[in-house]
Amino acid sequence: MNILVVGSGAREHTLVWKLAQSEKADKIYAVPGNPGMAELAECVEGVSITDNAALVKLAQEKNVELAVVGPEVPLTNGAVDAFNAAGIKAFGPVQAAAEIEGSKSFSKNLMKKYNIPTAKYEVFTEAEAAKAYIRAEGAPIVIKADGLAAGKGVIVAMTLEEALGAIDEIMGDKAFGSAGSRVVVEEFMAGEEVSVLCFTDGKTILPMVPSQDHKRVFDNDQGPNTGGMGAYAPAPVGTPELLAQVQKEILEPTIKAMEAEGRLYKGCLYAGLMVTEQGPKVVEFNARFGDPETQVVLPLLESDLVEVMLACIDGRLAETEVKWSKGAAVCIVMAAGGYPKSYNKGDEISGLADVAADGSMVFHAGTSAKEGKIYTNGGRVLGVVSKADGIKEAVDKAYAGVAKISFKDAHFRHDIAHWALERLAK
């Protein structure tokens, strides 16, 4: 069958890479795609991923039988609804279900209504009311822009001054545009984070290998939040006992709650969790594969991804077996200097071919191609991914890959998977 992947980041590159391994995949198209995907898919430029009519038209012209929508923006914009209306199977939640990511206040209110464990919170549309609440609660405290902010709309404020400044930044300076016209202020949760992604057809839930993202830009989890500086899987914090608890107390109640609200959820649900002393609690839900978690989870998937996606769409997940390999995978993000603030574009990248020769993979996040050369074209530029029998070996292999790649002012963290390595050392 012909497959269309919507998106242009490293997550979509990984999806294309995994879908291409299926015997069911005849031809893959990516819109707009990126230079890394171009080896496996035909990249189609000139079609906006938020123009549903144009996406459907493209899919019809290319005789696409399966559309896979990667990023949150087209999902919350109703791309899956548009494909469905045209009779094209699409993987991902419909617009009403994607609101679980599109609005943090919707997500928090859903959890409160259905007793799904999460941090205590309040929602504000007025800056002064938010500040009064923050002064009463004290720091540390977490401030979130309500809408989509490309993974950067969360400020973990360790001091009162920082928290009040975050309100000014989000609501006053409109640092995240209209996404910050409403804010969610919630209690700070101490613990270790873990990402649990799952496949679901709206009834059955099959969790993926637990992974862990590194959000802060600098080593030792310092500096501002980013879209993610690296990830690894499986995360040792995600023990079989913890995953059973997450399934029973978080994933199953959430999928049931969405159905009860008339928002049947099909696709990939991402649960970002904090493992607290009281047990796992939801930090956030995403309506799609995580980035960079996808880059470490899908390399461990042994099953045919096309088959699994079709089972989610057709409501056949209960009769589908999803197998995972026993090893570990690590992704190190190479970013442009200055990210997540202002950064340079258009710097030539060298050494990509050398990494492939070593058995590691490079997923393109923000690159462009010109006359056979690859250049930087985003904040997060590349994800270097390695697989091995254990985390330590995968980490060493991935950093060996990073060492072979160079571009001006390249920035990456040197401590990816440190939580796991510290745990294993004990």
Image (cartoon, grey):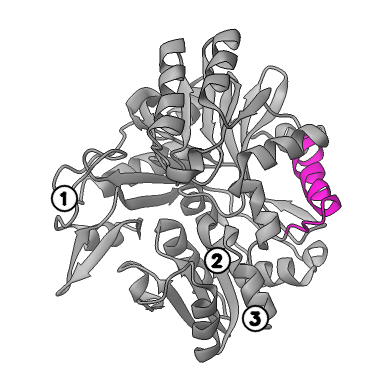
In this rendered view, identify the residue nearer to me: 44 or 353.
44
Mark 3 burial class by Cα count in 10 Å: few <14, some 14-19, many 20+: some
Quickly name the residue at label 2: 69
Between the C-alphas of marks 2 and 3, the distance is 12 Å
On the image, the x and y values in percent for residue 297 come to: 54, 51
**357 displayed left or right of 320:** left
Magenta-drawn segment: 245-265
Quickly name the residue at label 3: 88
Q: Earlier in the sequence, mark 2 or mark 3?
A: 2
In this rendered view, identify the residue nearer to me: 412 or 71.
71
Q: Relative to residue 59, is residue 127 depicted above or below?
A: above
Q: Relative to residue 64, is residue 409 depicted above or below?
A: above
Q: Under tag 1, what secondary structure? A: loop
Quickly name the residue at label 1: 407
Q: Under tag 2, what secondary structure? A: strand
Q: Residue at x 70, y 29 (%)?
A: 118
Q: What type is the residue that disc 2 sits on?
A: Val
